[in-house]
Amino acid sequence: MTLSSPWRTDFPALAALDAQGQTYLDNAATAQKPRAVLKALSAYYLNGAANVHRAQHLPADRATRAFEATRLGVARAFGAASPAQIVFTRGATEAFNLLAYGLERHVGAGDEIVVSALEHHANLLPWQQLAKRRGAQLVVLPLDDRGDIDLAAAAQRIGPRTRVLAVSQLSNVLGRWQPVAELAALARRQGAFSVVDGAQGAVHGRHDLAALGCDFYAFSSHKLFGPEGVGVLYGRETALAALAPWQFGGEMVREADYQDALFHDAPMGFEAGTPPVAGVIGLGAALDYLNGLDALALADHEAALHAALLTGLAGRDGIRLLGEPHTALACFRVDGVHHADLAHLLGEQGIAIRAGSHCAMPLYRRLGLDGAIRVSLAPYTDGDDLQRFFQALDRALELLR
C-alpha cells in the first residue's frame, strides 16, 4: 500500500517501534514526539533547569522567556486575542476540573449543567460532580443517527436555567466534528458559559477560537505531539474573570498575610505552584514544528489514510463501524467476536490499537455496547502501517472464527 508519509523520519520513536515489530495506531490516546520536541526538552535540562517568573539569574530568565514564548505561540495558533487568555494546566482533565470548581459559585440548586451523550469522562465527571455538590441537574443532549449532537434537541434543552454547556469538538469514539459554534451560540443566548473539549479536535486542522465563540476551550499537549503533563485552557477575558481560583500556592498570589490574600488575574492566578516548565517548552517546540508543515499536504495525507482505513474495514465481512467518522479514527465491532479477544491477538502481532470503552462508558451504554476496537491515525502513519494492521486483523479473525 502506498500513502507514504514525508514526516515519518521526523519522529525518532517510530524507528525504535519498527525495530520492536510494533505498528503504532493508538494516536488518539497519545502521539509520538518529533525530534524538535526531544531537542527542546534536552536543551532545557542540559543547559540548566530553573523555575519561571521567580528569579533574576540567567537560567530562570531563559526558562521564563521560553515558557512565555509558548503561551504567545498557543495564542497565535488558536486565534486568541491575547496570551493572557492562555492558562497552562497539567492536562485537559485538570483544565475541566479547574473550570468545574472555578465556576461553582455560578451554579445553584435547581440550575442546569448541559453535556452531550458522547462526552469523554474528563468532560463529564467534573460537571456531574459539580451538579451533585450544588444540587443542580445534569442535562444530556442526545445524538442523531449519524452521531452528531442534535441541534434541535439542544435548542429545547439549553434554557434559562442552564449555567454551563460542556461539549466535545471531535468525539474520541465516533470521530465526528460536532456543531460547537452553534451550540456555543445557544448557550450565549441564555447567558450560560460554554466549554469545549478540544483534546481530539485541536490535533486536526487549524482552529480560530475567537470565531468559534466558546467561553472556554481545553486540550492536552501529549495528543498534539508535545510532552505529557501539560494542558492548555483558553478562556475569553470576561469568562476567565468570572472564575474563582481553585488551587492555591506560590506564584498565583499578589499579596498575602496570615489572614488573607489577594490573587493575580488570569493566567497566573490559575497557575499555582511550579508549572510543568519543560513540558510547556516542549509544547512550544511541537507547535513550531506543526506550523512549519504544509497544512494542505497534511490534511490531504490524513484524508487519504482515513479513506483507506474505512474502505479496508468496509470490505471485511462482519465488521460494523460505529457512526460515520469524519477524520483520523475509526471504532468498530466484529460480529461474534469480543473486542478484548481481538485486541489481544492484534497486540500479539505488534499492532498497537485501543480496545474498550475509551473513557466514554455512558456513550457505549447508549449504543448498547460494552466496548469496541479503535484505530487512530497521525501524520506519520503510512500505508505500510495500515497494510500490517489489515494483515494482522485478517489473521486474528481467522483464528477467532
Image: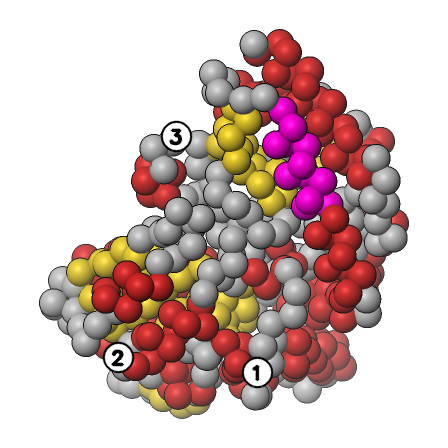
Name the residue that disc number 2 marks.
Answer: 190
State the residue at coordinates (86%, 40%): 2
Secondary structure beneath disc 2?
loop
- Amino acid beneath label 1: Ala
Q: Residues within 10 Å of mark 2 (few under 14, many from 20)?
A: some
Task: Please state, as top left, top right, bottom left or bottom right, where the N terminus lies in the image.
Answer: top right
Front disc: 2 or 1: 2
Q: Position of residue 249 (x, y in %)?
A: 43, 73
Q: Position of residue 66 (x, y in %)?
A: 72, 77
- Amino acid beneath label 3: Asp
- Would residue 197 be found to the left or right of residue 164 on screen? right
In the picture shown, does residue 110 fall above or below 236? above
Name the residue that disc number 3 marks.
Answer: 370
Q: Position of residue 394 (x, y in %)?
A: 68, 19
Secondary structure beneath disc 3?
loop
Badge number at residue 80: 1
* Residue 154 seen: yes
Q: Nearer the viewer, residue 277 or 308?
A: 308
State the residue at coordinates (61%, 16%): 397
**Label 3 to label 1: alpha-carbon separation:** 39 Å
Magenta residue span: 305-316
In the picture shown, does residue 201 fall above or below 3? below
Q: Are marks 2 and 1 in contact (CB under 8 Å)?
A: no
Q: Residues within 10 Å of mark 1 (few under 14, many from 20)?
A: many
State the residue at coordinates (58%, 77%): 208
